[in-house]
Structure formats: C-alpha cells, structure tokens
Amino acid sequence: MPPSSYQAILLVDGYNIIGDWSDLKKSRDRHGLEAARRELIECLINYTAAVAYRTKIVFDAHYQDTPRSTEEYTSALSVHYTAFAETADTYIEKFCATFKHKKYQQESTRLIVATSDRAQQLTVVGYGAEWRSAQMLAGEVDQAARKTRSKRKTKKKPSGRFLFNALDPVAQKRLRQMQRGLQ
C-alpha cells in the first residue's frame, strides 16, 4: 500500500502500552520483555492491516548502550528502538514536531499517538496530533479483531460434502470440461 493510501500514521509508545495492557503485562512478568514486545508487535500488525494505518512502534533503548535502529515487519508496520539516553517520548515529540512540515504529507493524513503518559498526551496534542490512551487503543484493537472474525464467518460456506462444492464456479466449470475431455 503506498504511503498516500494510509488513513493515518499511528505512533505507539511501546513500553507504555505493555505496562498498561494486562495481558502484555502478564506476559512481560512471566516470559520477559522480549515476549511482551513480540506480542504487541503481532497484535498491532493485525490491527494495522485492518484499519489501513502506517504504524510505528517506539521502544526506549532501556539503558542499553545501542545505536538507534529500525525493523520493518510489514510495509505498514515498523519498530523503532531509540538510541542510548533517548526516550520514546523524545522520539515521538520530534516526529510530531516535524510531521506537519514534511513535503510528502497530505492534508488528509492524520497523526495519532498512543500512550497513557499524561505529559506526552499534552505535548503531542499541542503539536496537532490526535491522542489515544493505551486502553482506548486496546478497545480499538479488540473491535477491529471482532470485525475481522465476523467477516470470516459470514463468507459463504461450501454446500454439500464433496470437495467439488467447495471450488469456485470457474474451477467447477474447468473441472467439468476436463471430465468430458474438453481442454
């Protein structure tokens, strides 16, 4: 999906969300931070695809002496690890500050920041971004998952017990032709 077709850019304060969502918090406490990060990433890959957002998950360097890095998981979702001594808040604030000055940005593109940090909320709204708390994002993620599941359930199920009935009409016609020796 080209960048112009995204409805919004979603910036996610990764550790803030992990610390707020109970299932991710449990995973972090039982299996470690890496497991919780993987679960958050997987969850947001599905959400991002359902809502057509360009999502950037930001994680602090977490006191590790590492350079800034980015991992692309899909064309719509990337994970950004800040440099040593740079917080996710700082990264998000810089992104928000430069967002409206970018040449590629269209007026219809929205910027949404997901964090429950009150100071961060006030800052990003001051830059013109929208804000979602961790719980608001959790509700939106759950709603998108339910909608996706209901779409899958409503798809027409094959009638009859034969494999032939599960084929699409074009494949059924081709199979009939092959049975009659017409190729």
Image (cartoon, rainbow, N blue to C red):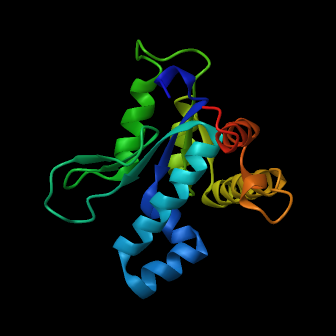
The residue nearer to you, when weighing 128 against 109, is 109
Tally of numbered tags:
0
The residue nearer to you, when weighing 167 against 36, is 167
- Compared to residue 128, the image places residue 62 above or below, namely below
Across and down, in percent, residue 105 comes to 48, 17
User: Which residue does the image show at 73% across and 37% down from the upper left?
Assistant: 173
- Compared to residue 130, the image places residue 121 above or below, namely below
Q: Residue furthest bottom?
A: 30
- Left/right placement of residue 116 relative to residue 88 reads right
- Compared to residue 43, the image places residue 56 above or below, namely above
- Left/right placement of residue 1 relative to residue 59 reads right
User: Which residue does the image show at 52% across and 20% down from the upper left?
Assistant: 4
Q: Residue furthest top?
A: 103
Across and down, in percent, residue 110 comes to 59, 28
Across and down, in percent, residue 90 comes to 35, 45
Residue 117, visible in the rendered structure: no
- Left/right placement of residue 108 relative to residue 105 reads right
User: Which residue does the image show at 51% across and 51% down from the upper left?
Assistant: 45
- Compared to residue 152, the image places residue 106 above or below, namely above
- Left/right placement of residue 83 relative to residue 56 reads left
Residue 166, visible in the rendered structure: yes
Q: Quadrant of the C terminus?
A: top right
User: Which residue does the image show at 43% across and 63% down from the upper left?
Assistant: 15
Across and down, in percent, residue 171 comes to 68, 40
